Structures are given as structure tokens and as C-alpha cells.
């Protein structure tokens, strides 16, 4: 499912119609309808998906919004961790990159 | 500090701890029930067969098969009858007709007399498959979510098919990997 | 039409119906059409399935069709063996003819585990009382069957010792009160617990060792069409000489474990996801490690009380 190289300008989207999310404690079970798979997300990856559903954005944009929502700072959640989380969501098909040129 | 604030701090600390684990490489997304072919994770399906040596499998057009390590060379799409007989005679295991599923049998079949003048007849009614020594085969990978064998047409798939046949014919044989196959065949009940 | 139980039937009629492949077993969630040439199977049915409704001629389309037959025509004469043939392609190990009952049980289990799409199927024991059901999820050797039997002794109805059958539209499990399969040491434990008359004679030297079956009670079978909401989920593991301990599981942990124990979760997709998560919302779950059945039962009684059972 992982899509090739992405850039800082790549817009990440999530298709709300493609999954069902149920929360238990601080854990989120996501059923992906198109793939028939069930994924377990934590509060960070769940927030990334929620933000990408509400308003697709590039890595920096999503990072800022997610940190704001979760009341975290960059020390709690380094950008590398955020980026690797986005890539993991891409790999399982919960996020998709949509090429976007800002130039 | 009030107890509400207390639990809020604890909750935040738990989340920070999880982020630290994430930064240290713990996966942040987990896919559930993604075992063999998407089926349930059943330990008996996870066993692996390591082939003790290189293996060749000869299949005829009726699905009979001979397993050994003899040499066989195709000439103009055909095998010499002498070589075929030699391979069969020296085979470690042989299987009756209908043992190899149809996708492993030769597509077209014709035999002829002494076509190349070297005193031997030849036949295209055979297909040869080779497996390398120490090749790993996980038979559970070939069991689909419905519990049916889901075999391709490669040599490893053929090995799995014949293993299941061997378990049926002789569950205590010395066929490499027999216990793995028997455990799979037995995994329910 | 009043139901006919196997014990009401004539042995020769049952055998001839089996030979013709017309014998119909009607039990809770599934009806089965059975075929066999094995007299051992007739003995087994009259012993272990004696209180189960049956027909000598097919009355309806059955869920399961199973032929306990020799692996091939030659085998029948050379070395008498049987395999379960559920009518779809599945690998099965031939067993000696005297193990036909085991072949029947394995074949029926295979049919349910691999071909049932009406329920989300867990590899679990299940029992219920008038307030709700208990699911006992565990691998082979975890003590699933022993705990299922112990709970039956406390007045719970037997649903199954092998399958938790969850409806897809509501958080209810469905009975399938086949005999409880006992292996090795658990046979004597259960004989002592319930009385030897409730346990079949042992089949020795099977691929699983010594096997015996604890018969379902008539009351279990009579209520085989009454489902129950799941209130308590147990994940036992048995180890010799260990003091009992238990840990309450979060909903998330429970869901993760149950997804792994469901045989058709992936097959059923979204319906399975919803049914499973709905069930867990209404149930308490515990991981239990124990070495003594009675000590374990003391904990289970407490948990059942807390769960409203």
C-alpha cells in the first residue's frame, strides 16, 4: 500500500467513508472497509487520521494541528516520530498521499 | 492538587511514555488478525519445513509423481525415456496418479520413437520441478482463510501438495516436514 | 411434530440411515447430515448423542454434511481407516477405524470452524445461566473443556466446549451443545467431578492421546435454541502447581485477543468487527492462570457475580 516518495508538500488525505472507528480507553480500533482489515491505533495515530479526514494537509500542517489538539509540544512528539507515524498509516492504507504542487 | 488534576497528569504521563516508546521504534499502528493469508494466527500453521537437500519432483500427465535428486535434462522439450526410468527407479518417494494437482502436470503430452537417432525414445509427458537445499517452506502460507489449500503452480506449492498427500498415504514416513504437515492437518478438532 | 431422540430410535435403522447418508442430527445452531459405514459410530451416537433429536431421513437442508469414510477404496480393505469428509476440500489425517467417533467430532468441528458464516466463531468454550453467558477462550491445553464442565456443574447450560458462536446482529452467543471433548488428565478430573456415567469410554492412542467425551445433558439440548448475551469472558491458562492469579483486562486487550481467537473474523469483515466490539462493551474480561480447577472456580464465581451472572 505504501506509496513511493513523498515531499514536504505532499497532501495527506483520509477517506472517512472507508473506515469505522471505535474507541476503547485510549485505544482506537479502525476497520478499513476496502481492505477488510482491522487496525489498532493509539491517540497519536488516531488524531492524525481524524485531522486528515477533517481537512487534508501536508506533513507540517497536520503536525501543527495534531500537536495542538493533543496539547503536546515538539519535545513530547518529535517531528521524526510524527512522520514515521504518517508513513505507517500510509502503509496500511488509512492515509493516502495526494500530490500537491505549491510552487 | 485535586484528584481530577492528578488523574489528568497521570494520563498525560502515560501518553508521553507511549510517545517515547514510539520514538524508540515501537510501531504506532498495529494490524490485527494478519496471520497466514489473513487468517487467524494458529500456532500449528506457523511451522516451517527446511529441505535437507536439493529435491527434484517429476510429475506425469496423470498426476503421479516421483521425488528424488537424480539428474534429468530436457532435449527439445522432451525427456529421454531412459533418463525418466532412471529417475523413477532411484526416487526416494513415489506418488500414485492424481497426487499432483492439475496445474503441475505437463500441458501437452506426446511421445515418440527414436526421433534423434541415439537409440532412445523420448516423451514430453513429464514436468520436472526443482527445490534448493535448505529452502524454507511454510505450509501454513498456503492455507487460505477458508481452511482450503491455496496453491500456486511453483515448486514449493507442489511440495506442499505432495506433503499433504504423503500425510494421507503414510503419516509416519520419513518425508521431510511430515510432522509439520500432520500438525496442520490436525490443527482443529 | 414431536422430536425423536436418538435413544428412541432402533439401532439397525440408524445404521442403515447412516449407510445411505440420510441421517440427520439436529442440534442448536447447526443440523448435520451424516454418512458412514462405521458400526463404531453407531455405538458412539447411541452413547454420547443419545438425547439429541435426529431423523432417519433428511427433512431439510442441513448446515453440515459429513461423511466419515475410508480414505480410498483400497484402504478400506488393506488397513481399515476413516477420515472425515465434510464435502469441501480439506486435508484430514486418516485414523484407524475404531477412532471413527474422533473423526466425526473433528469433521464437525472443521465444518463449523471453516465454513460457518452466520456467526462469528471463536475458538472458545461457552456456557450460560438465566442471566447471561460466559465465553472461555483458550488454546488447546488451557483447560477450556475442564472449566466448561465445572461451570456446567454449577448450573450453567452447555453451549459448546469448542466454539463461541456470536450472532452478527446482537451480542448473543448461540448454543451448539455437542459433547465436551476431554484429553489426557482432564478425563479423570471430569469423571470424578460429574460421575463416570456421564463420560464416554476412552479412545486410546489417538493423535491427541487418550480422548473421552462428556455427554451434554438433556436440559442443555432442550434449550439449544435459546441464545444468551455475553457477560463474562475468560482467558484461562493452565500450569501444574501454580497458585491461581487473575488480571482484569481492558476492553482493548480483550478485543485484540478475541480477534486472534476468531476463526472467521477476516472472512466476515465489518459485521465481525461490529459484533465483536459490541460484545466486549457489555462484558467483563479476565486473564486467569491456575493449576487447580476448584481454586480457579472460586475466582470465576466472584467474577461471575460482579458481571451480574
Image (spheres, coloured by chain):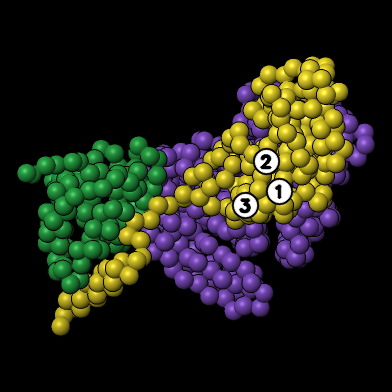
Chain colours: A green, B yellow, C purple
Chain of the residue displaying label 3: B
Disc 3 or 2, which lies upstream in sequence? Answer: 2
What is the secondary structure assignment of the residue under circle 3? strand
Are tags 1 and 2 found on a single chain?
A: yes
Who comes first in sequence, dot 1 or dot 2?
1
Residue B121 x/y as whole percent = 83, 22
Q: Disc 3 vs disc 2: Cβ atoms closer than 8 Å?
A: no
Q: Position of residue C135 (x, y in %)?
A: 53, 55
Distance, label 1 to label 2, CA atoms, is: 7 Å
Question: In the orientation shown, which residue stands out farthest toward the right?
Answer: C78
- Say if A78 sits above or below B83 in the image: below
Q: Which mark is residue B117?
A: none
Q: Are marks 3 and 1 on the same chain?
A: yes
Residue at left offset 67%, top offset 41%: B130
Nearer the viewer's eye, disc 3 or disc 2?
2
- Name the disc covering residue B130, or none: 2
Q: Which residue is mark 1?
A: B54
Earlier residue among tags 3 and 1: 1
Taking the view exactly as shown, the residue that stands out farthest to the left is A103
- In the picture of the structure, the residue carrying the numbered disc 3 is B136
Cβ–Cβ below 8 Å for labels 1 and 2? yes
Q: Position of residue C214 (x, y in %)?
A: 73, 53
Q: Residue at x 35, y 38 (%)?
A: A33
Q: Is residue C159 visible?
A: no
Quarter of the image where one finds residue B7: bottom left
Image quarter of residue C296? bottom right
Cα separation between marks 3 and 2 = 13 Å
Amino acid at each position: 500500500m505504501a506509496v513511493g516518495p513523498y515531499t514536504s508538500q505532499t497532501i495527506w488525505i483520509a477517506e472517512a467513508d472507508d473506515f469505522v472507528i471505535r474507541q476503547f480507553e485510549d485505544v482506537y480500533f479502525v476497520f478499513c472497509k476496502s481492505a477488510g482489515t482491522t487496525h489498532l491505533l493509539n491517540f497519536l495515530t488516531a488524531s492524525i487520521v481524524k485531522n486528515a479526514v477533517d481537512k487534508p494537509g501536508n506533513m507540517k500542517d497536520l503536525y501543527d494541528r495534531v500537536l495542538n489538539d493533543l496539547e503536546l509540544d515538539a519535545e513530547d512528539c518529535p517531528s521524526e516520530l510524527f512522520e514515521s507515524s504518517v508513513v505507517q498509516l500510509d502503509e496500511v492504507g488509512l492515509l493516502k498521499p495526494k500530490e500537491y504542487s505549491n510552487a | 492538587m485535586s484528584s481530577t488534576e492528578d488523574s489528568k497528569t497521570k494520563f498525560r504521563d502515560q501518553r508521553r511514555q507511549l510517545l517515547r516508546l514510539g520514538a524508540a521504534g515501537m510501531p504506532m499502528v498495529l494490524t490485527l488478525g494478519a496471520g497466514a493469508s489473513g487468517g487467524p494466527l494458529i500456532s500449528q500453521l506457523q511451522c516451517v519445513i527446511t529441505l535437507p537437500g536439493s529435491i527434484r519432483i517429476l510429475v506425469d500427465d496423470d498426476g503421479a509423481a516421483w521425488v528424488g535428486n537424480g539428474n534429468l535434462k530436457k532435449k527439445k522439450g522432451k525427456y529421454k525415456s531412459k533418463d525418466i526410468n532412471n529417475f523413477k527407479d532411484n526416487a526416494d518417494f513415489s506418488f500414485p496418479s492424481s497426487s499432483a494437482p492439475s496445474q503441475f502436470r505437463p500441458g501437452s503430452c506426446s511421445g515418440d520413437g527414436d526421433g534423434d537417432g541415439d537409440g532412445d525414445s523420448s516423451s514430453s509427458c513429464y514436468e520436472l520441478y526443482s527445490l534448493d537445499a535448505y529452502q524454507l517452506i511454510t505450509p501454513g502460507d498456503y492455507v487460505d482463510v477458508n481452511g482450503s489449500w491455496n496453491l500456486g503452480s511453483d515448486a514449493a506449492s507442489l511440495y506442499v501438495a505432495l506433503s499433504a498427500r504423503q500425510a494421507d498415504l503414510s503419516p509416519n514416513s520419513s518425508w521431510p516436514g511430515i510432522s509439520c504437515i500432520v500438525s496442520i492437518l490436525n490443527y482443529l478438532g | 411434530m414431536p422430536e425423536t431422540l436418538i435413544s428412541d430410535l432402533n439401532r439397525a435403522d440408524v445404521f442403515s440411515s447412516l449407510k445411505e447418508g440420510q441421517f440427520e442430527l439436529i442440534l442448536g445452531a447447526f443440523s448435520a447430515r451424516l454418512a458412514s459405514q462405521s458400526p463404531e459410530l453407531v455405538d458412539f451416537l447411541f452413547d454420547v448423542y443419545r438425547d439429541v433429536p435426529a431423523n432417519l431421513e433428511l427433512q431439510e437442508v442441513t448446515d453440515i454434511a459429513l461423511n466419515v469414510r475410508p480414505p480410498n477404496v483400497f484402504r478400506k480393505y488393506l488397513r481399515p481407516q476413516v477420515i472425515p469428509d465434510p464435502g469441501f476440500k480439506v486435508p484430514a489425517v486418516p485414523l484407524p477405524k475404531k477412532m471413527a467417533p474422533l473423526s466425526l467430532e473433528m469433521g464437525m468441528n472443521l465444518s463449523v470452524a471453516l465454513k460457518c458464516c452466520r456467526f462469528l466463531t471463536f475458538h472458545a468454550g461457552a456456557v450460560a445461566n438465566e442471566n447471561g453467558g460466559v465465553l472461555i477462550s483458550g488454546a488447546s491445553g488451557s483447560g477450556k473443556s475442564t472449566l466448561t464442565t465445572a461451570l456446567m456443574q454449577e448450573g450453567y447450560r452447555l453451549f459448546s466446549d469448542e466454539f463461541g458462536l456470536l450472532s452478527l446482529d446482537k451480542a448473543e452467543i448461540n448454543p451448539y451443545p455437542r459433547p465436551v471433548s476431554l484429553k489426557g488428565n482432564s478425563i479423570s478430573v471430569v469423571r470424578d467431578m460429574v460421575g463416570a456415567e456421564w463420560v464416554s469410554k476412552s479412545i486410546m492412542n489417538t493423535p491427541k492421546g487418550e480422548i473421552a467425551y462428556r455427554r451434554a445433558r438433556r436440559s442443555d439440548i432442550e434449550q439449544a435454541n435459546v441464545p444468551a448475551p455475553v457477560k463474562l469472558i475468560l482467558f484461562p491458562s493452565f500450569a501444574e502447581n501454580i497458585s491461581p492469579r487473575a488480571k482484569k483486562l481492558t476492553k482493548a486487550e480483550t478485543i485484540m485477543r478475541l480477534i486472534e481467537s476468531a476463526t472467521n473474523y477476516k472472512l466476515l469483515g465489518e459485521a465481525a468487527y461490529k459484533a465483536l466490539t459490541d460484545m466486549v462493551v457489555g462484558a467483563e474480561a479476565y486473564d486467569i492462570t491456575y493449576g487447580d480447577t476448584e481454586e480457579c472456580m472460586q475466582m470465576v464465581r466472584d467474577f461471575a457475580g460482579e458481571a451480574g451472572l
